[in-house]
Image: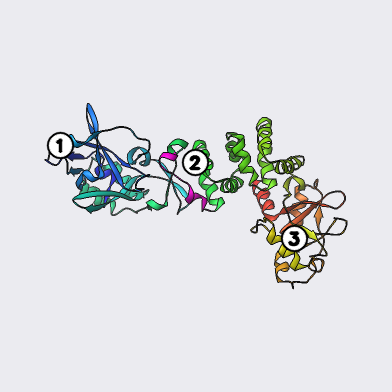
Amino acid sequence: MLYATDLLGGEAYDRDGHFVGHITELFIEPADQPNRVARVLLGRGKFLPLVVRYDHISFVAPGVIRLNVEEKQLEHYQPNEGWLALRKDLLDQQIIDTSGRKVVRVNDIDLSEHRTNGTVELRVTQVDVGLTGAARRLLHGVASPGVIRGLATRLPTRVIPWEFVNLIEPDPLRRVKLRITHQKLERMHPADLADIMEQLSPVERQSIIASLDEETAAEALAELDKRLTTQIVETMDPEKAADILEEMDPDQAADVIAGLTPESSREVLREMPGEEAREVRELLKFEENSAGGMMNTDFIYVGEAATREEVVAWIHEKEVDLERLDTVFLIDVNAKLSGAVAVGRLLLAPGGERMDALKMEPLLSVHPDTEDKDVFELFDKYNLHSLAVVDEFGHPMGSIEVDDIVTRLRNK
């Protein structure tokens, strides 16, 4: 096993044993091979630096590489933003450990050797984020490699396999050139992704959100601290912000827009589709600490005379967030709230059972101006998962979910 610190600062010799220069950088070309050291940069004092290709290397050891070509066959260095520099872009930089779901700092980089046809390829296998890497960095050039390795074996090891590393690159153009994607982040739970983003700088958070798909970005923003969410959305292009907010539940989108400046909120609402914008505007009329300010207007209600089979078939046809579907509300012939049916009871009922035979007792609801503390008491007293919000005529306007209650109580 070799380490980046073993090679950086080391010496390079050509095929004839002539000294060529000192190793100042190692480059990966992600567009070609995601973990192969494709180029080695050699500094030569006042002379232009040279670049060694991976197929020019015949021998590698701590502090030295030997080439299979003469010095005159090497090219002069030309900067390339499509190259990932191990010293500049990785060492001492923050990365995301997608396996451990946290932000860490890179202390060293582990390299493996692959020998083919007289050449030695170096490949990044993992990054060291523990004390062993820090010790190698601190003692490099001070103690002998043998002493450093001996000390490192007695320290706890913390490494991350390269395939679990997610790089943080704020520059969108460079992200494209380096082929940095956030597919690994998109597979994480939104709450874990939000925790990671809270550890980053504002520019880095913006970089992550900008490169996620709208649905994932919406889920992550919904889990973030409200202050951070406002900061992120404020600096976005209004069209991009509208695309993300459109993926949120209306109550969540309204909460975000309520925190924006009047000018920003107008711009974002202008970019949202008409129906979604109308729902958000309606919710913005209610006080934040009221039932109306907590309710979600995207909820399921059906006629009380419908059968269980008909309702299940109808839900199948709708674009329903099944993870949040907990309760189906009922209305009578006058479109007034007449009951609520738990999804568990719905699924276990016979196909021909009428919905009004499945409803729970007592019939509970609140008006939009009901204070949040009264809503909390109802959820606590009756162990509710959902609660309907009705207008002055008893028509359902929306529902409050238990996760909304938990979020409000946590924020308080």
Q: How far across and down, in percent of the image, does residue 12 sit?
A: 19, 39
Q: How many labels does the image show?
A: 3
Q: How far across and down, in percent of the image, does residue 200 sit?
A: 49, 41
Three-letter amino acid code at the position of disc 2: Leu
Q: Say left or right for 135 vs 165.
A: left
Mark number displayed over residue 200 = 2
Q: How far apart are marks 3 and 2 (CA)?
A: 40 Å
Q: How crowded is mark 3: few (under 14 residues within 10 Å), some or many (20 or more)?
A: many
Q: Give me the residue at 25% from left, 43% from top.
A: 7
- Image: magenta residue range: 175-188
Give the residue at mark 1.
19
Three-letter amino acid code at the position of disc 1: Phe
Give the residue at mark 3.
328
Residue 287 image-quadrant placement: top right
* 1 or 2: mark nearer the eye: 1
Say which label, 3 or 2, has the lower sequence index.
Answer: 2
Q: Distance between the residues labelled 3 and 1?
A: 78 Å
Whether label 3 touches label 2, CB < 8 Å: no
Q: Distance between the residues labelled 1 and 2?
A: 43 Å
Q: What element carries label 2?
A: loop
Mark number displayed over residue 109 = none
Three-letter amino acid code at the position of disc 3: Val
Q: Residues within 10 Å of mark 1 (few under 14, many from 20)?
A: some
Q: Say left or right for 360 vs 15.
A: right
Say which label, 1 or 2, has the lower sequence index.
Answer: 1
